Amino acid sequence: MRAEALPDSLVVVSNRQPYSHEWASGPVDGPIEDDDVTVSEATGGVTSALDPLMRARGGTWVAWASGGADMAVAEDGVVEVPPGEGSYRLKRVPLSDEAIDGYYHGYANQVLWPLCHEDTGRMWGDPTFWEQYRAVNDRFADAVRSVTDADDFVWFQDYHLALAPRVVRRARPGATLHHFWHIPWPAPSVFDHCPHARQILDGLLACDVIGFHTTVFVARFLRCVESTLPDATVDEDAGVVHYDGASTHVVANPLGIDVEGVRQRATAADTAAVRRRVLGETVPDPSIPIVLGVERLDYSKGIPERIAALDHLWERRPDLRGAFTYVQKASRTREGIATYRRYRQDVVAEIQRVNDLYATDDWQPIAYTERKLSTETLDGLYRVADVALVTPHRDGMNLVAHEYPTACVDGDGALVLSELAGAATQLDGALTVNPHDIAGIADALERALELDDDERRDRLERLQESVAALDSRHWVERQFATGPD
């Protein structure tokens, strides 16, 4: 192993881009003026961790051109960002609707996503999915080659880009390649379901370093390599794979959040205004405690079980009816996939059923919103909440579990957390649950609501200390402190 300084310049490669451009009122002919386009900045997760690094050190970010005006404002596919600052370059990869359907909605999210979340019954391996996934990874690799020199640092992000490292390695044998796999890695018995297991591993093992959030995922990956690639040699103790004449270090490097940024936004939030904006008339009484869930409408997030747990709790404890309101902040996602559209319908129907069952003239049990919230408003909503329910079936990390306690700047808050989220292995102070145990979730919520002041403060302080130790700045530093001797 070696400890090295952060690279002076870096090429980041991800499906999602940090900034996107949309037409304000439709495409224009002739020169484009500033008011012809709007710019949106991606928030959370990888972008919030890497954008500050790129601003400080420069380099190039390669990503899918997802905005309608993205290519029109770019020269040879490249635009300087952030707007008005131009700290680094964004190299955009335009994709056709056919490519998006096969690569993103298809292979990435109907093969790799359910596979890695160990929900193989949802896998669907249409042959065109693999064809497009491979073709789009080639296109990303071409884009990387166009913006790199022989010995550059390239950092690939997530399951969308498992094959591109091998293609780049052939063209840039002297480059330093890293990959970070942000979602869980499955057990070998589950990975066996992958129809292209060898190709996925071969692509990833072109990297010098592969990062995962937890040691569990590292161990699983190494076992999958051992069982799938007989010509690979795995040193589990050292976390090194020797394959195709090269060595790959496989490391656990948990991603955190911008702790100070969340804390500052939560502190500055007008909590009364946040309640009015997000909840409106659904929770008019500011004295009613709020229990909060925040996630995308993805079947891995465990929302139906959570709603069933609320039903179970209110049925078992009639005295808690009217004692708190559950707020579900949801975001639509991957609506090009029928499974996701049906999932949203099921969630909304279950919320309506529970509300019909328990609502009174002056109390709504569950408030549901899909409203797009700014980071300032979301951090204020975290601060408003007395309890957060974070109960995914499985998650690589889950940064809501980091953001919520950080935003509890008033020293009050409790977290109920799935023991199958990566965050559960990193954070101390949460009330952990099996996300499939409906009665167990209800019991944990009941306990969270009834914690005495001393235990509540102690648990929250431990959570905040755990989150601070995983600040996203440290994630970047740790990633580049590992590599070949």
Image: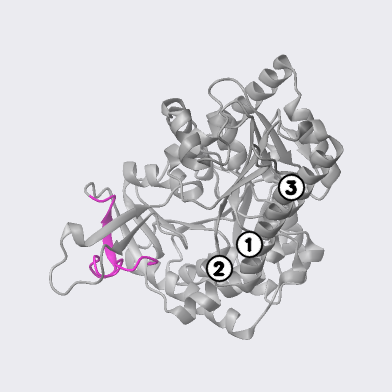
SS at circle 1: helix
Give residue 335's mark: 2
Q: What distance separates the C-alpha of mark 2 from that of mark 1?
A: 9 Å
Residue type indicated by callout 1: Arg
Q: Main secondary structure of the magenta part?
A: loop
Which residue is most to the top? 454
Q: Do the CB atoms of the residues marked 2 and 1 lie less than 8 Å apart? A: yes
Q: Which residues are magenta?
A: 65-83
User: Residue drawn at (75%, 44%), measured in percent from left and top?
Assistant: 358
- Queried whether the magenta region covers residue 52, the answer comes back as no
Residue type indicated by callout 2: Glu
Q: Nearer the viewer, residue 352 or 441?
A: 352
User: Residue drawn at (66%, 60%), measured in percent from left and top?
Assistant: 242
Q: Do the CB atoms of the residues marked 3 and 1 lie less than 8 Å apart? A: no
Q: Position of residue 371 (x, y in %)?
A: 49, 51
Left or right of 74, for residue 363 = right
